[in-house]
Image (cartoon, helix red, strand yellow):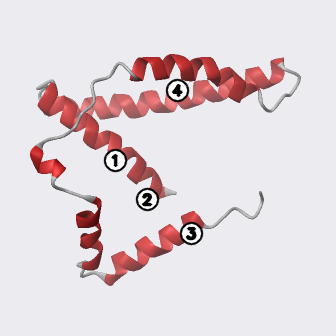
Amino acid sequence: MGINASILSSVFSVWYMHEHLERFRFPREWLNSTFTTATFLNGVTAIMAGAVADIGVQLTANNPLAPFLMMIPVFIISASYVMEWEENRGTEHTKQITFVSSLNVCFYLKDMKLVLVSNCSVTFQSTPDPTF
């Protein structure tokens, strides 16, 4: 789970750093406090979402679908907000990096321990849960 969480959050981190430094030209010193605040608020949001979901389940006589149904209006509002964002298409330098060229890095790795750990993680994460 650790490497997957890192990969998922690194996409946001790279996007935000580009927006922070290149688009809005904020000082580099603000990055640390911004990521600290975002991490804290992410945890607070997760706790609040869990509490609201639990309240929803209790109010609907233990209906396990209640949290998902409660999220439909939130999803619609969020999607309408996100659709107004200007897309970051990158620079000419970033456009030259393709999926195939990024895969070439895997073949030139000198440390086989890194390759082994990566393969073990991918295999473990792709294994279906036997409880389902």
Which residue lies under the disc numbered 3?
124
- The label on residue 3 is 2
Secondary structure beneath disc 4? helix
Q: Position of residue 113 (x, y in %)?
A: 36, 80
Mark nearer the N terminus (2 vs 4): 2
Q: Position of residue 43 (x, y in %)?
A: 50, 33
Which residue lies under the disc numbered 4?
45
Which residue lies under the disc numbered 1?
10
Q: Is residue 126 depicted above or below 57 in this figure?
A: below
- Cβ–Cβ under 8 Å for marks 2 and 3: no
Image-quadrant location for residue 25: top left
- The label on residue 50 is none
Q: Within 10 angstroms of label 1, few (less than 14), some, or many (20 or more) residues?
A: few
- Cβ–Cβ under 8 Å for marks 1 and 2: no
Mark nearer the N terminus (2 vs 3): 2
Report how far apart the C-alphas of labels 4 and 3 lie in the structure: 29 Å
Give the residue displayed 24% in from the left and 82% down from the top: 110
Q: Amino acid at mark 3?
A: Phe
Q: Is residue 130 left or right of residue 77?
A: right
96, 25: nearer the viewer? 96
Q: Amino acid at mark 2?
A: Ile
Q: Amino acid at mark 1?
A: Ser
Report how far apart the C-alphas of labels 2 and 4 lie in the structure: 22 Å
Q: Position of residue 123 (x, y in %)?
A: 54, 71
Report how far apart the C-alphas of labels 1 and 2 lie in the structure: 10 Å
Give the residue displayed 41% in from the left and 79% down from the top: 116
Image-quadrant location for residue 130: bottom right
